Image (tube, rainbow, N blue to C red):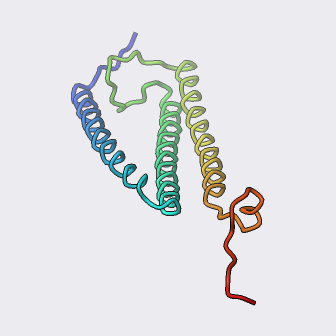
């Protein structure tokens, strides 16, 4: 059985990448807690605006990552299909990996491309859910709606 050998340089790169990711995550968590405590002390209208903006940015970043991973999986599947083997030639691997040929490689290519499409569909669903949530919380209720739920509304304008 043919094996594709692990790349020690790639293994080191992945290790340091994840260490850096943990450090960035810890700093981000600290900054988020500080930001959230400031938002909690803000006026409700200002707090809502900041929370909606943070929500939209977070969902945008999530969508960007989903699209990037979906495209990567699609392209990797296309490379596997074109080469007729998995992993495709030139792909670096973390562990010694048995090479699949023929029908097994074709199934793996379809699986990779299917997962890529599924992630892109998830991204579309996330965009729709984000838009609906954002517009629901960003809408400003009119005076009639406020009166119906029992909120006193001061008259606007001067005396008529």
Q: Nearer the viewer, residue 99 or 52?
A: 52
Q: Is residue 152 above or below residue 14?
A: below
Q: Quadrant of residue 142?
A: bottom right
The residue positioned 27% from the left and 43% from the top of the image is: 27
Provide residue 111's location: percent of width, then percent of height.
57, 27
Give the quarter of the figure containing the C terminus. bottom right
Give the farthest residue toward the top.
Answer: 1
Provide residue 33's location: percent of width, then percent of height.
35, 45
Q: Nearer the viewer, residue 7 or 131?
A: 131
The residue positioned 30% from the left and 43% from the top of the image is: 30
The residue positioned 60% from the left and 55% from the top of the image is: 134
Give the quarter of the figure containing the N terminus. top left
Q: Nearer the viewer, residue 9 or 104?
A: 9
Side of 35 relative to 153 (left or right): left
Tally of numbered discs: 0
Provide residue 32's location: percent of width, then percent of height.
36, 47
């Amino acid at each position: 059985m043919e094996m594709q050998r692990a790349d020690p340089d790639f293994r080191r790169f992945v290790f340091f990448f994840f260490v850096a990711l943990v450090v960035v995550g810890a700093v981000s968590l600290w900054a988020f807690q500080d930001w959230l405590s400031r938002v909690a002390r803000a006026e409700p209208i200002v707090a809502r605006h900041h929370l909606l903006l943070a929500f939209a940015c977070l969902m945008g970043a999530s969508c960007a990552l989903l699209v990037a991973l979906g495209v990567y999986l699609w392209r990797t599947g296309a490379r596997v299909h074109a080469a007729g083997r998995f992993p495709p030639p030139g792909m670096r691997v973390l562990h010694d990996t048995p090479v699949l040929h023929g029908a097994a490689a074709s199934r793996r290519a379809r699986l990779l491309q299917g997962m890529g499409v599924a992630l892109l569909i998830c991204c579309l669903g996330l965009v729709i859910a984000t838009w609906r949530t954002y517009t629901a919380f960003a809408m400003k209720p009119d005076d009639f709606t406020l009166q119906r739920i029992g909120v006193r509304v001061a008259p606007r304008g001067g005396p008529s």
